[in-house]
């Protein structure tokens, strides 16, 4: 019976419920420090239990599986029947007890709703304050340190486990909303309140805890952890292998192990409350998750409300309609049902004749009223003539001519200016004497280009206009001399140059020159 | 009142009119997409529109951040000429497509905010396993190509309505079985799709044995208890029909309605004209709210193209024989002749033998939709308003004669 888990056999038998009830009775008795139970005692404990004989059978079966042990009942009896019946006292076996413990754990794990413990947060803060106070002392009491740390770990483990279970159950609630809408609706207000409160606590207390953690680390928490580890190690039994020398003091090993363990715990604890750059703290994650759960809940509520917006269950409505459509007698009734149930059809109207005047008496029958006038083309061909006249194309030739004239005039002026400037041979500026405004404008541009291109020291410069239509060659003349160019707008005075201006647009000339 | 005020007032009235017309043409207007502009106007004038529709038609106008829905309770449950279509001019939905539409909506109502076409199809196949549907002869296993294209037609309708919007992929790939499509589901649009005073699922089964029971249970509004309410109900009913349907014939009304209408006719039609720009054409037999702008309709008449032309010619033909029902045979013959006569203008296949039957049916469908004829299996009867289309031989003025 040792390792074959026969004590779990009752779980899969058809009468599993009864067996479990009986075992629960034994556990309960054990809690009251009662060791032995008679079948009658079990029967008494079970509400609406079956007949005692059935229970006796079940007990015998449990004995066979190894969950219970039967000892002969030697007590005094008062009836003959009892005396002749095989009588036993039953008690839990070790296996049976272990099985029940396992099952209890199993049930708890599954059934746990999980809770977010605001109280635990406060407790943790208290412990940390205590620790901080001790850390300040030169020689802290190891027992106090150890107890504080121990209870801190205990509370914290609770908190973490519960938070995990809670988030799991919350997710389940949200996922399962379909099955139990009413419960869910009743539950969600309280749940949201609860979440809000917890988030608030987590924010305020969490921040305080994070602060305390920092202070403790500054106050050398490592030392406190070592004290705790050392105190635990003091209880370590001498090594069983009996080869302990001075070097391998079992307490030393235990201390080392304990120290590492405590440090790990502290790191875990720290990670829970203090975020670093790359890893947000667990508390923060939990907060986010709890916060995210609220809109999720609200979405579920909204979906439920939507579903209830109608006076009847909409899904059932659609199913009913599907059935009615399927059972409709003929095609016409299908369409009638569609229009009646959904009301999605367009309005439908005849066309009016905009030109027709409405001066027909309301007592005129349709047959006597003037009929609709319909485009002859539509009547004849089935398609409309073009409605109305196309827009008249505007005649813009006059404007165009004006623009053309303008362009021609400009071109002529430019050509004349060019012609006026072009020199057949190098000419002194002072020889130019007078220029018309157009030509002068052009000339100023050229002169400017040439002067800008001139490098200091060079006495000759050659350049062309940016549009490449004209070229100018400019040579500095020795000796003083001032040129004057007269225009209708005034006189340009400046140092005299020898200039040669070429019109590059007239190809022939250019070629002739280069030849 | 300054000139500027005048202009502002008229532009306001114009905006209101455009908003109202947009709602009547498409009772579900989304903030994004082709009707975005209309949506802005509807939002701007939501209060006025809501009050108008509530007072005059009893229709609720729901305007939310992303969609506007005019909940048009139908004015007329007997009219089979308003089918669902994948797009304009596509054939009307078949029984299977309607059923699939409802199953798809039921699925989407429970779906997450996104869904693929493949997933949707799976769910619909599951839904189609409903014993009642199977008993009614509905099968959908998504095996054949026609089933796939039915599904795609449904999805395209939902895309058009805005229940779905496409994120990736395209439906053609799904039909060819080479790919899937991902959609966003817009639950708010979905929530506003049904427009009935009662949810179909609340109609008790014993009260819905027959189809007629069902449709009347679906559209029944709570009975009016006071004279005021009764009058209000009548006004709603009349306004709905005038606002939404091409022609209202007096002989379709009951006594109370006729009495009310004879007293309130001008008031009702004037209100409609103010809101929508539709003009009342009042005749001895009834009222047609006609549209001078020629776009507040889903069936146009006159319309261009072969079918439009055939409809026009057929209307002309029928309008000359108002008194008695015309056998369908004769109409086929007439269309045949017209097809020959207009060979050069009509679609090439319109002149093929046998094409006249389809053409005639299409033309009669339009005329029936416009409430210009009534028909049974064998004959067609002209309704009074068809006389509008009794066209005189066109007199063509030479340009000089024009006034």
Image: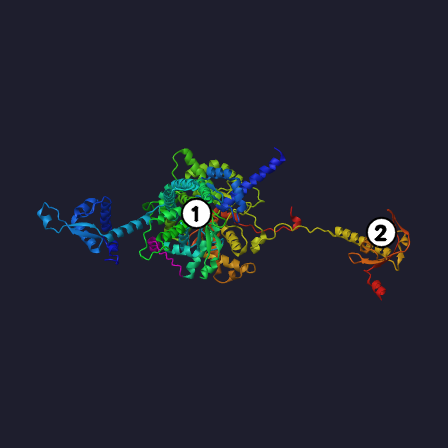
Q: Give the range drawn in magenta.
A: B128-143
Farthest-out residue, top: B1
Residue A253 in the image: state x and y as whole percent: 37, 53
The answer to whether B152 is drawn above or below residue B74 in the figure is below
User: Which sits in the foreground, B163 or B277?
Assistant: B163
Farthest-out residue, front: A246
Residue A222 disc label: 1
User: Which sits in the foreground, A357 or A118?
Assistant: A118
Farthest-out residue, bottom: A515
Residue A43 in the image: state x and y as whole percent: 19, 46
Q: Are marks 2 and 1 in contact (CB under 8 Å)?
A: no
Question: Does the magenta-highlighted stretch encompass residue B58?
Answer: no
Secondary structure under the numbered disc 2 in the rendered image: helix
Instruction: Tell me which secondary structure the magenta stretch mostly adopts.
Output: loop
Q: In which quarter of the image is the N terminus of chain B?
A: top right
The residue lying at 38 percent from left, 59 percent from top is: B141
Q: Distance between the residues labelled 2 and 1?
A: 95 Å
Secondary structure under the numbered disc 1 in the rendered image: helix
Residue B239 in the image: state x and y as whole percent: 47, 40
Chain of the residue where label 1 is placed in the rendered structure: A
């Amino acid at each position: 019976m040792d390792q074959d888990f026969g004590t779990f056999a009752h779980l899969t038998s058809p009468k599993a419920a009864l067996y479990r009830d009986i075992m629960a009775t034994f556990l309960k008795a054990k809690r009251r420090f009662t060791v032995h139970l008679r079948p009658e005692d079990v029967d008494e404990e079970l509400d609406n239990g079956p007949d005692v004989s059935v229970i006796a059978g079940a007990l015998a079966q449990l004995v066979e599986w190894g969950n219970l042990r039967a000892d002969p009942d030697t007590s005094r009896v008062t009836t003959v029947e009892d005396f002749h019946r095989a009588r036993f006292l039953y008690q839990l076996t070790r296996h049976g007890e272990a099985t029940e413990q396992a099952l209890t754990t199993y049930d708890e794990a599954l059934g746990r709703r999980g809770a977010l413990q605001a109280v635990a947060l406060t407790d943790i803060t208290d412990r940390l304050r205590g620790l901080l106070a001790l850390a300040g002392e030169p020689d802290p009491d190891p027992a106090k340190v150890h107890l504080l740390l121990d209870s801190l770990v205990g509370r914290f483990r609770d908190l973490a486990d519960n938070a995990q279970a809670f988030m799991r159950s919350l997710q389940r609630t949200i996922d399962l909303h379909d099955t139990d809408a009413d419960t869910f609706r009743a539950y969600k207000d309280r749940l949201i309140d609860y979440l809000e409160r917890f988030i608030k606590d987590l924010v305020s207390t969490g921040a305080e805890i994070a602060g305390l953690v920092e202070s403790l680390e500054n106050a050398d928490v490592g030392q406190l952890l070592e004290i705790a580890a050392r105190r635990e190690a003091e209880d370590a039994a001498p090594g069983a292998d009996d080869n302990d020398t001075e070097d391998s003091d079992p307490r030393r090993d235990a201390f080392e192990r304990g120290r590492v363990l405590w440090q790990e715990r502290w790191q875990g604890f720290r990670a829970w409350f203090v975020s670093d750059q790359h890893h947000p703290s667990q508390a923060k994650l939990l907060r986010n998750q709890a916060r995210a759960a609220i809109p999720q809940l609200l979405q579920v509520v909204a979906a439920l409300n939507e579903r209830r917006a109608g006076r009847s269950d909409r899904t059932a409505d659609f199913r009913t309609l599907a059935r009615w459509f399927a059972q409709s007698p003929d095609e016409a009734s299908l369409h009638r049902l569609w229009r009646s149930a959904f009301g999605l059809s367009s309005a439908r109207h005849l066309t009016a004749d905009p030109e027709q005047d409405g001066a027909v008496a309301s007592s005129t029958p349709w047959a006597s009223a003037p009929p609709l006038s319909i485009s002859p083309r539509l009547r004849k061909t089935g398609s409309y003539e073009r409605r109305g006249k196309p827009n008249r194309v505007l005649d813009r030739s006059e404007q165009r001519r004006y623009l053309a004239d303008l362009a021609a005039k400009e071109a002529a002026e430019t050509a004349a200016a060019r012609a006026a400037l072009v020199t057949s041979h190098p000419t002194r500026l002072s020889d130019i004497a007078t220029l018309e405004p157009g030509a002068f404008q052009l000339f100023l541009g050229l002169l400017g280009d040439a002067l800008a291109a001139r490098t200091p020291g060079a006495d000759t410069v050659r350049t062309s206009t940016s549009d490449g239509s004209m070229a100018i060659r400019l040579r500095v003349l020795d000796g003083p001399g001032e040129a004057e160019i007269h225009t209708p707008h005034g006189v340009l005075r400046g140092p005299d140059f020898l200039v040669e201006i070429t019109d590059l647009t007239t190809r022939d000339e250019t070629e002739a020159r280069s030849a | 009142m300054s000139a500027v005020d005048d202009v502002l007032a008229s532009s306001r009235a114009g905006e209101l009119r455009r908003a109202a017309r947009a709602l009547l043409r498409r009772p579900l207007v989304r903030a994004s997409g082709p009707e975005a502009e209309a949506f802005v106007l509807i939002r701007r004038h939501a209060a006025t529109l809501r009050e108008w529709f509530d007072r005059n038609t009893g229709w609720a106008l729901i305007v939310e951040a992303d969609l506007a829905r005019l909940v048009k309770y139908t004015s007329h449950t007997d009219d089979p000429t308003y089918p669902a279509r994948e797009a304009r001019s596509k054939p009307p939905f078949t029984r299977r497509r309607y059923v699939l539409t409802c199953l798809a909506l039921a699925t989407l109502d429970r779906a997450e905010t996104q869904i693929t076409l493949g997933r949707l199809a799976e769910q619909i196949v599951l839904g189609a396993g409903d014993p009642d549907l199977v008993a009614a002869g509905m099968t959908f296993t998504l095996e054949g190509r026609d089933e796939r294209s039915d599904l795609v037609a449904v999805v395209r309708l939902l895309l058009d309505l805005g229940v779905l919007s496409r994120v990736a992929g395209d439906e053609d790939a799904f039909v060819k079985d080479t790919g899937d499509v991902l959609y966003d589901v817009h639950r708010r649009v979905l929530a506003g799709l049904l427009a009935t005073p009662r949810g179909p699922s609340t109609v008790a089964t014993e009260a819905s044995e027959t189809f007629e029971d069902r449709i009347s249970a679906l559209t029944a509004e709570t009975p009016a208890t006071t004279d005021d309410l009764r009058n209000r109900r009548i006004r709603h009913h009349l306004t709905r029909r005038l606002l939404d349907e091409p022609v209202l014939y007096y002989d379709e009304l009951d006594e109370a309605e006729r009495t009310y209408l004879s007293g309130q006719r001008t008031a009702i039609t004037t209100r409609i004209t103010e809101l929508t720009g539709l003009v009342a054409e009042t005749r001895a037999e009834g009222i047609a709210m006609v549209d001078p702008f020629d776009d507040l309709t889903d069936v146009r008449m006159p319309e261009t193209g072969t079918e439009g032309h055939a409809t026009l010619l057929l209307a002309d033909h029928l309008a000359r024989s108002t008194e008695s029902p015309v056998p369908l045979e004769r109409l086929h013959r007439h269309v045949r002749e017209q097809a020959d006569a207009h060979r050069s203008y009509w679609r090439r296949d319109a002149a093929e033998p046998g094409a006249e039957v389809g053409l005639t049916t299409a033309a009669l469908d339009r005329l029936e939709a416009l409430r210009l004829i009534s028909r049974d299996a064998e004959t067609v009867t002209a309704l009074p308003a068809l006389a509008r289309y009794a066209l005189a031989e066109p007199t063509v003025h030479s340009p000089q004669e024009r006034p």
